[in-house]
Image (tube, grey):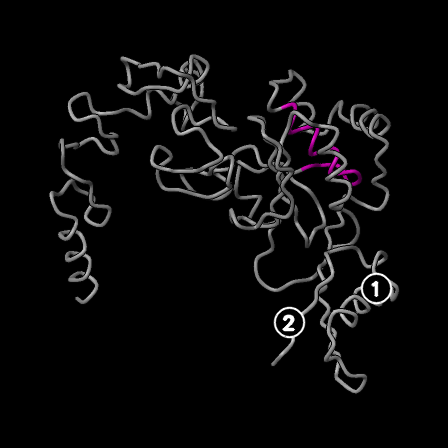
Amino acid sequence: MKDKAIGICFRRKDQLSTDVILIVWQKVTQSNSRFNALDKLFHEVHSVKMPVGFGRRIKIKGIPLNTLTHLKSSILKVKAETDCLAHALVIAIAKITNDPNYKSYRDGWKIGSVVQRLLETTGIDLNRGGSIRELAQFQQYFKDYRIVVFSGLNCEDIMFDGQVQTEKRINLLYDEVARHYRVIVNITGAMATRYVCKACNKRCCRDVTHKCEQTCSDCMSVPPCTFSYVRIPCESCNRTFRSRVCFDKHKNNKLRGKTVCEQKKNCAACGSLLTNKKHECNKPYCANCKRDRTSLLHGYVKKRITSQR
C-alpha cells in the first residue's frame, strides 16, 4: 500500500531549513512502524514567485498587461517610479473618501509628502518593493478597508485578499512584467463584466440574481445584516428586510448607478423577483431562450436544436 504524502506549510524560502524537514520526517518515522532505512524518500518542492513591486521589466510574449490597462479608463496608472504600492493605496483611499486632492494625487501632484508620512507612521520599508508581507502590513493598518490585489484582468486572478468585513474596498492591479501596482477605480469595467461580488469576488451577469453567503440578500451589504424578530416591508420594491438598518441600507446601497430598492423588486401580484421587463406571474424564467415559460424543458430543447444545426 502506498503511503500518503506529508506536507509542510507554505512559507518563505528563508524559513525553510533542513531542521524543519527533519522534524517533520522524525514525526513520520515514529508513527510508521513499517518504514525501512532502504525505502525511497521523494521530495517535491513547489516554488511560488512572489510579487516585488520594483525593478526591471520582464520580457514576455504576447500583449503585455501594461498595454491592455492603457485602453481601460477604469484602471489608473501610478506615475511614481518608487513606492508604487503606497502611492496606489493613497490614491485609492482618496477616491473612496471623495478627497478633494484626489485628482492631484492621480496626476502625481501633492502625493509625495502623504506617502512619506504614511511610510513613517506604519514603519513599512518599501526599498525592496511591495510584496505579500508589505500588503499584509498595510492591511493591518487600514483596518476599515479591504485590500484586494489582482494579478490579471480576471476575477479569479487574486494575488492578495485582506478578508476584512467592510463595505470599503481597495482594488489594485499588480503588473508582474512591469513590476508595478495600479489602481482599479471601476472593478466591472476592468474585468469587462456587468457585476463583481464584493464579498466572494465572483462575476455574474445579473447583480440582482447573484447569491452569496457573505452578502446580505436583502440590501446587498457586506457583511450580511443580522435578523430581527420582525421583517420590515418596503412599499416601493415589495420586499421585506431583516431589520431597520437593513431597510435603510437598501435605500442607499447602489447597483449600477441605482439604489437596491430601484434595481431589485418583487412582483406585487405573485411576489417573485422581477428579473426582466416582460414578467409573467407564476411562470418560471428560462435562461436559454430568455423568456418566461411554464416548462423549463422548452429552453433545453431549443438550445439542443440550435446547437445541432
The type of residue carrying mark 2 is Lys
Residue at image point 43% right, 18% down: 246
Q: Give the mark nearest the N terminus, 2 or 1.
A: 2
Q: Where is residue 174 in the image (x, y as percent from the top left)?
A: 66, 46
Q: Is residue 33 left or right of residue 203?
A: right
Q: Main secondary structure of the magenta part?
A: helix
Q: Which residue is drawn at 68% across and 55% down?
A: 177
Which residue is denoted by mark 2 in the rendering? 4
Quarter of the image for the N terminus: give it.
bottom right
Residue 267 higher or lower than 186, as above or below: above
| Residue 5 within the magenta-colored segment of the rendering | no
Residue 82 belongs to the span the image colors magenta: yes
Name above or below for residue 124 compared with residue 66: above
Residue 258: quadrant of the picture: top left
Q: What stretch is highlighted in magenta?
A: 78-94
Give x and y (percent) for residue 266: 25, 25
> In the picture, residue 280 is in which quadrant?
top left
Query: How far from the left and from the top, in percent, is residue 32?
Result: 73, 73
- Tell me the residue that label 1 is attached to: 23
**Residue at 69%, 26% in the rendered image:** 105
